[in-house]
Amino acid sequence: MHIHEFQEMMKRLYFQRDFDRGVNGTFNWLVDEVVELGEELKGIDREATEKEFADIIAWLASLANIMGIDLEKAAINKYNNICPKCQHSPCHCTF
Ligand SMILES: [Zn+2]
């Protein structure tokens, strides 16, 4: 399954509810899920951590659906086999 297909599945499952909740409410859910992932990363429960990753991509897809943004296209446009800052693969940026 490609990112685009996953996003379309999320649209079929949840679009009306996501649309009714709106951008701010859906963004807040995404942020809550990121915080939950942060908590899981402190522990040792691999299965729970995987589920938090799943929740984050699901809420990110929901938010993109509301905004009319194609996640796969956006990701590939920015990260197309090279670092968008230094134009190298692997990245040569210094932090
Ligand atoms: Zn770089």
Image: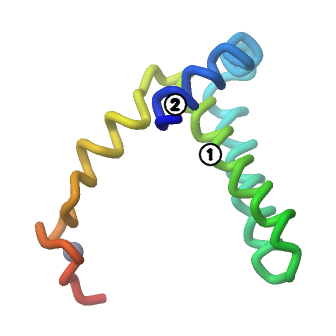
Name the kind of residue labelled 1 in the image.
Ile
Residue 32 position, x and y percent, is: 77, 53
Name the secondary structure under disc 2: helix
Residue 92 in which image quadrant = bottom left
Q: How is the image coloured?
A: rainbow
Residue 9 position, x and y percent, is: 63, 22
Q: Nearer the viewer, residue 95 or 78?
A: 78
Asked whether, in this view, residue 78 is left or right of residue 65, the answer is left
Residue 83 in which image quadrant = bottom left
Which mark lies nearer to you, 2 or 1?
A: 1
Q: Residues within 10 Å of mark 2 (few under 14, many from 20)?
A: some
Q: Is residue 47 above or below residue 41?
A: above
Name the kind of residue labelled 2 in the image.
Ala
- The image's mark for residue 64 is 2
Asked whether, in this view, residue 74 is left or right of residue 85, the answer is right
Question: Along the polypeptide, which appears first: circle 2 or circle 1?
Answer: 1
